[in-house]
Amino acid sequence: MDKPLTHTTDFFEDGSLESGKMMGRSLVNRLLTALCIVLSFAAMIPLGSILYLVVKNGLPLLSPSVFTSLPPAAGMTGGGFGNAVVGTCIMVGLGLAMSVLPAVLAAIFICEYSPNGRLAGAVRFVAKLLTGIPSIICGVFAFAAVVTVTGEFSALAGGVALAVLMLPTILLTSEQALLGVQKAYREASYGLGATRFQTIFRVVLPDALPAILTGVMLAVARAAGETAPLIFTALFSQFWMSSLMEPTASLSVLIYNFSTMPFEYQVKMAWTASLVLVCLVTAVNVTAQLVFAKKH
Amino acid sequence: MSMAGIEGMHDAVARRWPDFFQWLCRAASLAVVGVLLWIFWEIFQQAAPALDKLGLGFLSGASWQPNRDRYGVLPFLVGTGATALIALLLAFPPGLAIAIFLSEDFLPRPVRQCIRFVVELLAAIPSVVYGLWGIFVVIPIVQSLGTWVSERSGGFPLFAGPAYGNSLLTAGIVLALMVLPTITAISRAALVAVPRVLREGAYALGATRWETILGVILPTAAPGVVAATILALGRAMGETMAVAMLIGNSPRLSASLFAPSGTLASLLANQFGEAEGMQVSALMYAALLLVALTLLVNFGGELVLRYTERRTAGIR
């Protein structure tokens, strides 16, 4: 875009190349471009540093046995975080089980049944508000609604907290997915005599499914990395979980607990757990993008 | 019962399905609205004893001592505001620069795609990992920088020593990284939404690229950039784990950037697990404040965003 412009100026000024003023202007232009590029690349440095350190400090302890053994007690060495991996998976699964159906059904309601109704407006508004709520508030809510009622920290409470966290994400991405289905498809379906129900199930949902799945996976990736909703709902445990109603370990809480311990081995283990967590989250994220990319 | 009878029943059920499904969708929608109300009700319910006993004095009280049953949330309110402000000041220039960079054609498309991917990756890294990285990278840097600055600042309150690594500044720096993707993504959307005719008009009048960006594109996209900043503020205020790991969690009020402090979210993260009785209620009160503040900020951001959309729609 830049070059043709200078050419025309040159042309008008009859080949006398750039006057002093023009030179000043293009100098400012170059300086600002350089500044912009420098600032952009400067922002990449911390990310590079994070990834480098996670890999460098996390790799030494990474072995298959960390996935099958229990965390070491304070000051001890050896062991791993098998129970935390299981705990994270189970709590994210619980959260997903509780949130995915209401979220997708509500999205269908606000897109297909009554897009302009009062309830649809309220649902959109609430979903937006819920996405803005800090994740720790989900934990506070689950503490009040589950922990104080059952009287103990549990995987169930952690699952409830994660469900509240995932609900608005899945709802809003599902809405976008449904909106992305072309209007012509629906009209063609109605034109062939299909009912609304048939149109939703046979035409709209199959077409929107990859995008809905992407939203679900993004929500899963986010929930897997969250710590705040779990620290005082699921708490932590040194042991394998045996029921949903007992304190449960998770990768993110393990990182939090171990990172502040004064023992070198525990800190190393926190890095290794970070490596596993970052890989897990990135893998889910990338898969989500691929699922969506396949459709388009 | 005859075959026809069974099939008839089957048909009747099948015919009901659509109604049933619609009813189910409506119920799910009501449930979603219900969840928000339920959250408020639960927190409010548990905060009630503290609301009764402490009233508005909770907001202006400067000491938080659970063992003496004294609860004042002012230091944490100040900490929340200060860390969020530092984060925004640090994240805004690079955030906007990347947004401009991604919406212009300075470099070929693959390079821009790559940078966009990196920024999205920044958003995907879990908060605890930022915290862990902050402990080992940012804390030592801030500590030595703080010591150096505080020795030369002549007791200026903002830079007063002794400099701790666990400090307001450390939390602010890491928060800045965490809100950068928010600022970039929303600003970029606003910049891309600026109608092409405006840009072409500016070029036709002989403006250089940056004269076009500063004189035409940014002013048009300004509300969107403001919205991005407000939404980033909301995120910074609610961010918990990284802050809880880096800020030092001190309930003391201090003007220094290098002193330990606390935010509402870090207070909750630290004390909820072991709290009992009145302390739980006081923490619920603090949670209520946090929800109210973030909702207010996000609501403002959303309003500005909507205004932007209407405005650019008008130009087209």
Image (cartoon, rainbow, N blue to C red):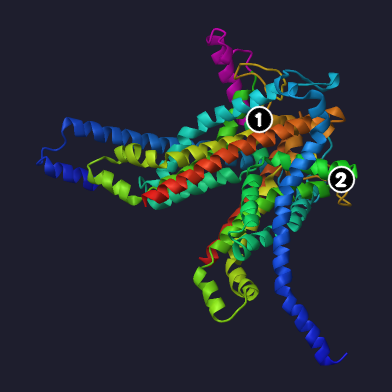
Q: Which corner quadrant holds the N terminus of chain B?
A: bottom right
Q: Position of residue B182 (x, y in %)?
A: 54, 42
Front one among B295 and A58: B295
Amino acid bearing label 1: Ile
Which residue does the numbered mark 1 point to in the structure image?
A: B135
With B286 as the anchor, is A57 left or right in this view? left
Question: Taking the image as drawn, is residue B23 in sight?
Answer: yes
- Per the image, label 1 sits on a secondary structure element best described as helix
Image location of residue A108, percent across then percent down: 64, 63
Counting the numbered discs, the total is 2
Pointer 2 chain: A
- Chain to which the residue tagged by mark 1 belongs: B
Q: Residues within 10 Å of mark 1 (few under 14, many from 20)?
A: some
Place residue B249 in its image quadrant. top right
The verdict on residue B148 being magenta is yes
* Residue A239 numbered mark, or none: 2
| Image position of A23 with respect to A167: above or below | above
Q: Residue furthest top?
A: B154
Q: Please state which of residues B269 and A99 is positioned toward the viewer in this rendering.
A: A99
Q: Position of residue B295 (x, y in %)?
A: 63, 39
Rendered image quadrant of residue B264: top right
Residue B197, numbered circle: none
Q: Residue at x 50, y 41 (%)?
A: B304
Question: Which portion, as a residue range, is magenta?
Answer: B137-163
Q: Magenta includes B105? A: no
Q: Residue at x 72, y 21 (%)?
A: B251
Q: Report the predominant secondary structure element of the magenta stretch.
A: helix
Q: Residue B154 placed where, x, y %? A: 54, 7
- Above or below — where is A20 with respect to A116? above
